Structures are given as C-alpha cells and as structure tokens.
Image (cartoon, rainbow, N blue to C red):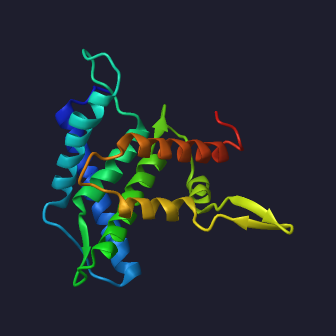
Amino acid sequence: MAKLTIEQKKEERLKEWRGWLSEFKKVQNVFSQKDVILIPHAAIVLNDYYWRLADYFLRPLLHYDYKKEHYLHYYKIISASELTTMAVMPFTVKGNDDIADNKKLNANFAMFVASTIMLNWKINGKEIIDLTSVNEIFSYKEIIDVVKKKELHYFLSFKDEHLDWLAGVNTAGPLPVLSNSQTWRLCFLAAKALSNGGKLI
C-alpha cells in the first residue's frame, strides 16, 4: 500500500470527522430527545484546528529526525482530537444557551471520538483491545479505603471524571495535549491488560 501524502491524510481525517459528527448527532437526538445542532462547516473547522494543533504545537515538542515525517502516537492523536473538540465546540442544544450544558455535550462528543479512535487501533491488521474491556475501565470505581470491613469506592468513574475535566479545560491558553495523552496511554494499557487476560502483551 502506497504511503499517504499529508494532503491525503488530512482528507482522510476530514472524512472521519464528518462520520463521527453524524453518528454522534444521530444518537444524541434519539436518546436525549433534544435538537442537537452543529456549527456551520463543523468537520472542516475541526479538521483545520486539529492539523494546526498537531503540526504547529505538538510536533515541535517531540524529538525526532527532522528529515523524516514524525508519526504521532495514537495517544497523542486521541488527546489532540479531544482538545480540538473542546476548543471548537461543534455542538449546541437548540434553545439552550447554557455554556456548561453545551460544554458537557461537547465533552461527550470528545470522549466518543477518543473511544472510537482507540477501539479502531489495529497493529498488523489485528485489534488490540475490545469494547468490553474499555467499558470496564470507563466505569470502574477503585477502592480508596476500608472502614469497619466496608469497602469505600471513589465516587467517580474514569469516564465521569474525564468528562468533568474536559468540560472544564481552559482552551484559551496552551492545551494540555501531552498530559492528556498520558491519561489515554494508561487507559489503553489497562484495557489492553484486561483484553489479554491480565497481561500487558
């Protein structure tokens, strides 16, 4: 298979943005019974922002041979995609001007994109993790103490806390792409271990 040019990669990502937006909007309208609307040219704006973030902010932070194109690892792609979503805010609920509600909606879309990218990651044509493992990691609430033989669990799952973090992230300054990519790295490694019966192979 021939190597894709940068322009071809940008076109492929634009198609993915269009698909993700369409699928998420369809599901939100069915389950929330609300009229979820998109900003004009949402996929184009998201794609443009993503590539600017990747090329002008993220790549210069990484160490690599400048004579060759540097491939971004999936964790960084996921992180940049989530933070792009929160900077652009492609979705709003019709008739609802509450910024907090719209941030929560877009945080859900950001995590939907992140999950989709992670679940579709293949190495040598083989899936690495499965949906069951990802859902288990997303919903898990770890034990934080035992009092009088009763287990006390942290009150937020990974998904709940990450959605709160996304909705509150400051997009006016430098975006925390690298630290967020490490969050996804750990999430992926945990899901991979579950998918492999407890082994990080």
Q: Which residue corresponds to the image point at 27% horizontal and 18% vertical from the top-left? A: 68
Place of residue 99 in the rendered image (x, y in percent of width and height, measured from the top left):
27, 73
Give the farthest residue toward the right.
Answer: 149
Place of residue 101 in the rendered image (x, y in percent of width and height, measured from the top left):
33, 75
Front residue of 119 and 108? 108
Front residue of 13 and 185? 185
Front residue of 52 and 19? 52
Count every numbered label the image shows and give the total. Answer: 0
Q: Is residue 68 left or right of residue 182?
A: left
Place of residue 134 in the rendered image (x, y in percent of width and height, measured from the top left):
56, 54
Q: Which residue corresponds to the image point at 36% horizontal and 85% vertical from the top-left? A: 33
Location of residue 76 (image quadrant): top left
Q: Which residue corresponds to the image point at 41% horizontal and 39% vertical from the top-left? A: 74
Location of residue 53 (image quadrant): top left
Where's the N terminus, which quadrant? top left
Where's the C terminus, which quadrant? top right
Q: Which residue corresponds to the image point at 25% horizontal and 82% vertical from the top-left? A: 96
Place of residue 69 in the rendered image (x, y in percent of width and height, measured from the top left):
27, 23
Location of residue 106 (image quadrant): bottom left
